[in-house]
Image (cartoon, rainbow, N blue to C red):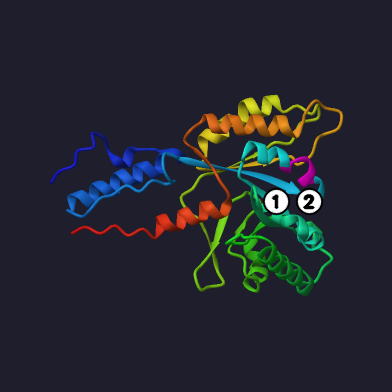
Amino acid sequence: RIVWFGFQLSQISANANEKIPLSELVFNSINWLAKKPEVWINRFPDKYNSLSIFTFIVDDTKIFNKQILPILNASQITSVILIKPTEIISSYENLRELCAIGEVVIHYDNMDMLTKSRNEIEGMLIKSIHILKENTQQKSIGVFINNVDDPSEYSFLFEETSFDYFIDKNFRIYLKEFNSKSYRKLNNFEYGTINLTPGLNNEFNKLIDTEFSLQLESSDITNILLPSKNYPGSDFSASDIISDCSTRVSLNNNIWITSYSKAIDWIIKRENLNVEFE
């Protein structure tokens, strides 16, 4: 058997989006030369070649449920809601309504924990997990770690709790190993974050027209961080910005709008898929 590529592999310089297809081409060619089976498994389900996660940082669940939740329900957008442990503990009765449109992820902000002891932090996290399990139907519980440069420095917190995954400040996903207290980063994905916070003039248009579209095209997993309230003194409304963003994503039919837990479920299934040949 002979494979002729028409180019020298050593002279190829691939960008981030080209590395994985190139790797698949080379290794499938080697498998074919060795008379081994070659197979291609889609990176994401169905027709999708990337995914987007709409994320809201929520300080007050009661206000969010009143102002933003009806908009999300009308738009039928699957969303991720980041809520701090103190708000989860004090407003747990609002969680069921929130989970109807997506999933709640615990928002761990290191700046809020500077005056608290390790035992206090662990206690708050464990109680938050318990409340989420009792008041929602989420199959997995995650935590977003904010204002922390190296999440591994805080691994002791998550070894003593039952988180299924955590998200670092750059929205990369770390998954808990089966029957283990250690976590691993999901590999081979290009991550992007679109932080839709208005500028000094409360303008979103330039941001949405340029960075939004470019980031969606260049990343496998794009987190869209949306404001959870109106900004005073501007023409912006939550309804307008959510509608605009969701329309732009839905027009691009190859983008999967989902949540972290659903994305992780698919990635695990893909990794564990066994292909047998007879």
**Occupied quadrant, residue 246:** top right
Q: CA distance from mark 2 to mark 1?
A: 8 Å
- Choose between 262 and 167: the one closer to the eye: 262
**Which quarter of the rendered picture does the C terminus lie within?**
bottom left
Q: Is residue 65 left or right of residue 158?
A: right
Q: Position of residue 92 (x, y in %)?
A: 77, 60
**Disc ID at residue 98:** 1
For residue 161, above or below residue 197: below
Residue at 69% across / 25% down in the picture?
Answer: 205
**Occupied quadrant, residue 146:** bottom right
Q: Are marks 2 and 1 in contact (CB under 8 Å)?
A: yes
For numbered disc 1, what is the local secondary structure? helix
Q: Which residues are magenta?
A: 64-69
For label 1, the crowd category at 10 Å Cα-Cα, with few meaning under 14, some 14 to 19 and many 20 or more, is: many
Q: Position of residue 237 (x, y in %)?
A: 77, 31
**Disc ID at residue 61:** 2
For numbered disc 2, what is the local secondary structure? helix
**Disc ID at residue 17:** none
Residue at 77% across / 74% down in the picture?
Answer: 119
Q: Position of residue 79 (x, y in %)?
A: 63, 46
**Identity, as a three-letter code, of the amino acid under mark 1:** Leu
Q: Is residue 187 left or right of residue 113?
A: left
- Choose between 175 and 104: the one closer to the eye: 104
